[in-house]
Image (spheres, rainbow, N blue to C red):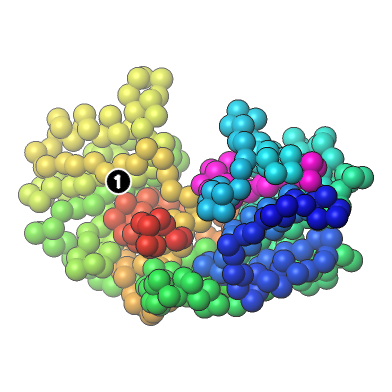
Amino acid sequence: MGRTASDVRLREIAYDPLPSQKKFHDSAARFKGFSGPIGSGKSQALCQEAVRLSYQNQGRTGLLGAPTYPMLRDTTQATLFEILDGNKIPFDHNKAENTLIMRDTQSKILFRPMDEFERLRGTNLAWFGLDELTYTQEEAWVRLEGRLRDPKAKRLCGFAAWTPKGYDWVYRRFLAKPVKGYEAIIAQPRENRYLLERIPDYYDRLKGSYDDRFYQQEVLGLYLSLDAARVYASFTRNEHLADLSLDPGLPLLWALDFNVDPMSSVVLQLKRGRVLVLDEIVMRHATTREACGEFLKRFPKHPPGVVVYGDASGNQQHTTGASDYDMIREYLKVHSTMPVRYKVPKCNPGVRERINLTNAKLRSAAGEIGLLVDRKCKELIMDFEQVAFKADTYQIDKDRDRLRTHLSDALGYLLWQECRPLPIVGERQEPLL
């Protein structure tokens, strides 16, 4: 505690950095990055660096950001507040302006999401740090570089942490052809001894939840090419096509993606943990009621009943005042005696998470096949074989063929409701993923 000759406030911080975290903090580069797999302590390193720079640049302004506001609030800010509270560092948080003042030094931290980067113009910064940089547009980073110009700063620095996401702009800028003044530290998998002491089988458990490609990227921290990559790379005809039959003792699971052209849905059953896709219903220029009629034509009676899943947008009311799910309820109530249940979320899962789960069910990193498709499901098979990412992104290319993606989307909504893994939690029951 106390002050040095240069009048900089000092504080003891309870922090024993891992080897890669220490290299990151020791780097004197103007722009530095921390690349690593999940569980490597990226957000911890990012926030510890923010605290240190706040003390080095007393009275000056810095910025902490993340791709979206929920990510900023739930991960980045939560980690920073835990560090401050755990070390009894006094601060004032203005929730309305989303800023924080460090009482020791009167340094200010701005919290900002990066999805509206045009708003980043303005105040001079002494430092900035961005979490999950690979999910941030390059323009946001460039805007912040231009704001790193506080003439009274003791240490000007821009820094970031990220999980690899292909050979994208982050890879090019920090690793492939680093710009002068840039340095990237790459964390190794299984380096986090604190995590492994609490959960020794942490990484092994993820093998059953992730497909092999995603496991290599997220758990091993490898850089993989995404150029024109198939979205459902785990699918092969030899492993996943079969002649399936309806089990009269199990309920039917019906998942819908609401599009006028085409109206798309899949019918399946879950049997001993395996997903069995029995049929698909694809109708051009059809209404929701017409889709219901076709479903009952194919499955007129089924005593165990049907469970309805699908796109959360189906909860939205149309000009008629009824939502798609209202129409399904009304139609099935009038035209069928089957028991019907509904498992529809208020909002859809993230596209990335839904894709990863589908690939993991097709074939997990441990090699387990958890999903089979009947050979007559031609459109779903074409989805699995033809839906692709846009080059160097995790964005699905929906412009290549307007008929694609709808059935695989519908299936993904159902899998998210029934098959997503429970979050792995730590000692205080906090999610570690």
* Residue kind at label 1, given as amino acid type: Tyr
Quadrant of residue 262 within the rendered picture: top left
Q: Secondary structure at mark 1?
A: strand
Q: Can you tell which quarter of the image residue 320 is in?
A: top left
Instruction: Reply yes or no: does residue 59 show up in magenta.
Output: yes
Residue plotted at (55% across, 43% down): 73
Residue drawn 34% across the image and 28% down it: 323
Say which quadrant the N terminus sits in. bottom right
Please provide the residue range marked out in magenta.
Answer: 58-80
387 relative position to 334: left or right: right
Residue 13 located left or right of residue 82 = right
Describe residue 32's horizontal placement relative to residue 413 as left or right.
Answer: right
| Residue 30 seen anywhere in this rendered image of the structure | yes
Residue on which disc 1 sits: 309
Tell me, yes or no, whether the highlighted magenta stretch contains residue 275: no
Give x and y (percent) for residue 200. 40, 77
**In this view of the protein, can residue 281 be seen by the observer?**
no
Q: Quadrant of residue 43?
A: bottom right
Which is more toward the observer, 59 or 172?
59
Q: Residue at x 80, y 60 (%)?
A: 31
